[in-house]
Image (cartoon, grey):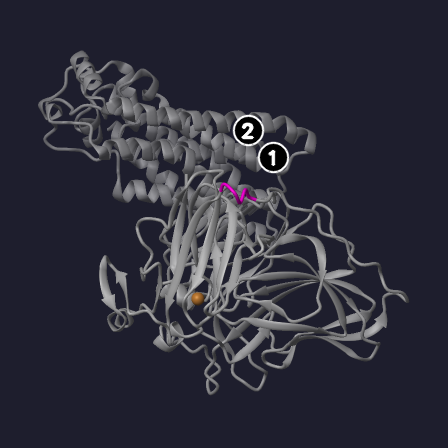
Amino acid sequence: MIPEIGHFALALALSLAVVQSVLPILGASHGNVRRMQSARSSAIRQVFFVGVALAALMRSFVVSDFTVRNVAENSHSLKPLLFKIAGTWGSHEGSLLLWVLILTVFGAGVAVLGSNIPAATKARTLSVRAWISVGFLSFLLFTSNPFDRVSPPPADGSDLNPLLQDVGLAMHPPLLYFGGSMAEVVREGTRFLSPQDRDAMAIYLFDAEVGGGRGHREGRRGVRRAEDPDRLRKRRGHWPRSERNELMRPTRRDALKLAGLAGLGAGLPRGLFAAEDIPELSAQVARLQLLPDSYPQTEVWGYGGTIPGREIRVGQGQRLRRRFVNDLPQASSIHWHGIRIDNAMDGVSGLTQDAVAPGGTFDYDFVTPDAGTYWYHAHNRSWEQVARGLHGPLIVDEAEAPDVDREEVLVLDDWLLNPETGQIDDSFDHPMMMSHSGRTGNYVTTNGRYNLTLPVRRHERLRLRLINASNARIFQLKLSGLEGWIVALDGMPLASPAPVEDVLVLGPAQRTDLIVDVLAEEGETADLVDVGENFSQVVFTVSGTASQTRRAVPVALPPNPKMDLPDLAGATPLRLVMSGGAMGRMDSAILKGERMGFRELAAAGRFWAFNGVAEMTDTPLADLGLGEPVRLVIVNDTVFPHAMHLHGMHFREVSEDGALGPLRDTILVGGRETREITFTVDNPGDWLFHCHMLGHAASGMTTWVRVA
Ligand SMILES: [Cu+2]
């Protein structure tokens, strides 16, 4: 009879939860106070009914009622009382029930004690909590009913999960759940507290969190201990068990179960109720007017559905967190280009993380050590995904901003569009593009516009942050009506501003920070001229005057940390020979461990090789130690230029006279050119080194270095 009471109480709790999931939130949206207040009584009653259910189950365990399947499977008549009680949450049915009770207790706590919470917010919060209760209770009742009877009942039970047969661990799940929920409620509650109260509560929150964390670690330790056969044997000696239990071995599954249980306590409340306030960055399919208005809209893939992706801006040294949400039809990941990042956050699918499947998420969380102009882009099938638009600017502000009137972030890109339909040409894997200079578009844009026009004033001083986000285009730019200085390359400040006297070359993935003064007269235009295409990449229309006189020559940006020159004399020599491509001299290369002829390679979609290998190998180009200085000679034995990008670290070019160039993360190596770079290896992890003509990277030009 008692189990039936428990079962019935659960059903009542579910119906209350259903009502609570609807009424208060409706009340909140219509301003109906009575409906909003109905949450209070239903929340309290749920605690009562779920409490009755848990008590009924616990009683069945305490009296060893083996007619209840759950008791028969998770207890034994000769257990000490503590372990009989622990049997209540020794199964997934029981632990779910316990969890629901704690959930409802805290829900009622919010209802009764949350007088400082605005009524509508409170009503909504309680409704949302009720949705979760409805889910759990339905799951319990319809798939995992802990009150199921078994007939005929066994003579004795089959014992408790061995992992819970430890005085400490027996009471572990309730404490863990309680700690997790407490942390959550405190966190929620503090949003409505005064700052002083919040400070006071913060200490408590910290305790609760640490407590939860400690519990989790304890749980894991328990798992390890339980896996120790000696310990198990000893324990089995203490308490009798049924025959079935003789065969019971702690399996990996059991271990995972407990770890999962512990994880439930630590992770689940946070994930479900609080929704950590980590901002989302979604990659999604969007249609927008990329071409002039007389053309149809173009389907693109964009971060936040825009082209370029949403600008991300943080201060230097700050923590950047984004939950990547993949709403694309393809797996993807995000690489934070140029950030000297923690390796696990580098976003390289297949090297530092698995690609995030469609519908999946990945939390990026890192600190931005360097100020400057960076960008983020897709790093799975990047030759397709970046071409479809998956990239955006990532700006890290200096602690002290340079003295300019304003700044403009200019993302330069090109698109290969079908002129009839206006849609992106989807021949991403076309051998012609892979084997030549790369996928070059027929439509050039700045910030997603072909005719970007910005109003300026005469003598105004601007900081222009140029980012080349194209797959393969090398932009050649000139200033007209503007006087400019290069102040940073690839994010890193130059020691002193370099006047722009000639053509600015911006290879794929490269960035240039300029400070420019508007010299053109009012009514005229100044231009960022694309010399290659012979058109204006950006038109600056001059109206008004910022000041009658010119400003002084700009000063250098503040240096970033770790800009020391590497020790050339003691540097480890490395060599990378690039070969292949159309009109190249590559007769053969290694692919999947076999030497293949150029034709065979081409049939496999490989047109390029690094040191005679046409794929990323299991072994790195170099195994390097932290602090090791390196000199890397790059021999371009092809007729095409390649933009070589190193992840995780910046390098300097060594010129023929031994002088060191500015810090960069991407170097453009011309056809048949040989260049040398040097850097001190100072970031541990597996770092990609590849051509940023993305089709080249996909067809043979990718390698990596390991830093340990
Ligand atoms: Cu290349």
Q: Is residue 568 magenta?
A: yes
Residue, disc 1: 190
Mark 2 and mark 1 residues within 8 Å of each other at the beta carbon: yes
Determine whether the beta carbon of the residue marked 2 sits less than 8 angstroms from the nearest atom of ligand 1: no
Residues drawn in magenta: 566-570
- For residue 246, side relative to residue 457 (left or right): left
Q: Which residue is mark 2?
A: 205
Q: Is residue 512 above or below residue 95?
A: below
Quarter of the image with the N terminus is: top left
Query: What residue lies at 29% left-to-right and 70% top-to-bottom?
Result: 587
Viewer-closest of 485 and 223:
485
Is residue 59 something one can see in this rendering? no
Q: Amino acid at mark 1?
A: Thr
| The quadrant where residue 657 appears | bottom right
Q: Position of residue 75 (x, y in %)?
A: 21, 23
In what quadrant does ligand 1 lie?
bottom left
- At label 2, the amino acid type is Leu
